[in-house]
Amino acid sequence: LAGTRIICDRKFLLECKNSPAARTLPCCLPQTPGVTSLAQSSLVKLEELKERNESEEAMPGEQPRATAP
């Protein structure tokens, strides 16, 4: 085997985690639901929860429902 082996210590890798380059998404990253973006079903669930919370806030006179453990 020919090639260069790159060896990094733990401290260096942990410092790289906080660099601006590590926090920026690549420009040409494909949109894969559930991998690089939220799954479509997750987006639908989030919208349903948001609508439910808004409708519960709109009805202040009702008592909150007790949930079973």
Image (cartoon, rainbow, N blue to C red):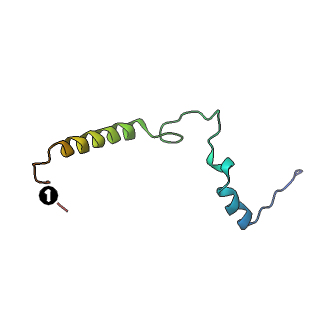
Give x and y (percent) for residue 41: 37, 38
Extreme right residue here? 2
Q: Which amino acid does label 1 sit on?
A: Ala
**Residue at the image position 64 percent from the left and 32 percent from the top:** 28
Quarter of the rendering containing residue 13: bottom right
**Residue at the image position 48 percent from the left and 37 percent from the top:** 33
Q: Is residue 15 above or below residue 61?
A: below
Classed neighbour count for the residue bearing mark 1: other residues with Cα under 10 Å, few (<14), some (14–19), many (≥20): few
**Residue at the image position 38 percent from the left and 41 percent from the top:** 42
Front one among 3 and 36 = 36
Q: Is residue 67 left or right of residue 7?
A: left
- Residue receiving disc 1: 66
Give x and y (percent) for residue 34: 47, 41
**Residue at the image position 34 percent from the left and 42 percent from the top:** 46
Image quarter where the C terminus lies is bottom left
Q: In this view, does 18 lie to the left or right of 69?
A: right
Give x and y (percent) for residue 64: 14, 54
Front one among 8 and 50 = 50
Quarter of the rendering containing residue 57: top left
Q: Is mark 1 on a helix, strand or loop?
A: loop
Q: Is residue 59 left or right of residue 10?
A: left
Number of numbered discs visible in the structure rendering: 1
Give x and y (percent) for residue 65: 13, 54
Q: In this view, does 20 lie above or below 42?
A: below
